[in-house]
Amino acid sequence: MGPPRGQGLVPTHGGLRFVARHPCRCLVKIRLQLEECIHHRPINAGVGKTHFCESLAKVLGVPVRRHPMDQAETSGALLGSDAVWGNSRYGLVFDLLGLGEYANPLVILDELDKAQTMGKTSGGFSSPTGVLHSLLEPVSAAQVRDISLDLELDASQIAWIATANYPWWVPATLRSRFREFLIMPPDAEQAIQLSRSVVRNALKAAGFGAGEPDRRIVVALAHLSAREIYQVILATAATAARRNAPEIQMHDLPCEALAVNANTQGGITWEPVSNFVCEA
């Protein structure tokens, strides 16, 4: 038997190595039980939390659904809207379990800290996170009900991962249901590993193939966050495409994306950044 598949996350997500080890430990067991996670960092968003979660789902071989909490206004998107409304619709849980082929999909609650409580025209308040108190508890999740279909579902096997930049904005009653991780700033090797992975994915998305990217470009962008690297590569690919080049070159990179210290003769200037990640 080879190493657990989850170990494939470590080379491309070195800065999240200790987070990746959690599903690796679970994969060693016969029955996979991936606990809910909340990933957060207080500053400098774009560390690659969502990218890591999507890679995790691919490694585990289960479907993944990203649910943007910053756009959610009610809990209807998860467990359906009330049947009294003419446009009532079933929720994400039924969509995954009732219409899908897996009982243990992975759901990313992206930007959980951005979820807002909305006031109702009839008085009172509506919170998009209210139903999570039941969905995140395996006992109660085994008997949740989609109110649009009036159908009971067993959602106890769904793996929930939440991302947040400001975890203190998440209600304490929800944070207590997650395991939280502290992410330290990546060292030089880990930053290069992450840069290589993001550059490769960005080039593939831009239509430049999925080959191994130029190491000089990988190293030159390693000081940036995952989001910034992705954006820079897309812009660089557009520059290369305008001159009909088959691949991007160092001179295609925008000058503002390079952090070069003249006193180090072209060496990269590394800026320490504080990162945090949590899991429940």
Image (cartoon, grey):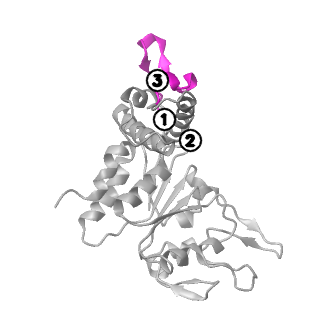
Q: Amino acid at mark 3?
A: Met
Q: CA distance from mark 3 to mark 2?
A: 29 Å
Range of residues picked out in magenta: 248-272
Q: Amino acid at mark 2?
A: Ile
Q: Is residue 257 left or right of residue 114?
A: left
Q: Is residue 222 above or below residue 93?
A: above
Q: Amino acid at mark 1?
A: Val
Count residues near mark 3 (Cα–Cα under 10 Å), then give few for <14, some for 14-19, many for 20+. Answer: few
- Residue 109: x %, y % from top left: 54, 61
Give the residue number, with chain letter if any, for mark 2. 43
Closer to viewer: mark 1 or mark 3: 3
- Residue 99: x %, y % from top left: 51, 78
Q: Kindly state the secondary structure of the residue where label 3 is placed.
A: helix
Label disc, if present, on residue 57 of the rendered structure: none
Q: Residue furthest right?
A: 121
- Residue 201: x %, y % from top left: 45, 44
Identify the mark nearer the N-term, 1 or 3. Answer: 3
Count residues near mark 1 (Cα–Cα under 10 Å), then give few for <14, some for 14-19, many for 20+. Answer: few
- Whether 92 is among the magenta residues is no
Q: Kindly state the secondary structure of the residue where label 1 is placed.
A: loop
- Residue 244: x %, y % from top left: 52, 30
Q: Is residue 180 above or below residue 125?
A: above
- Assess whether mark 2 and mark 1 are in contact (beta carbons under 8 angstroms): yes
Identify the mark nearer the N-term, 1 or 2. Answer: 2
- Whether 265 is among the magenta residues is yes
- Assess whether mark 2 and mark 3 are in contact (beta carbons under 8 angstroms): no
Q: Kindly state the secondary structure of the residue where label 2 is placed.
A: loop
Give the residue number, with chain letter if any, for mark 3. 250
Q: Could one spot residue 26 in this view of the protein?
A: yes
Identify the mark nearer the N-term, 3 or 2. Answer: 2
Give the residue number, with chain letter if any, for mark 1. 273
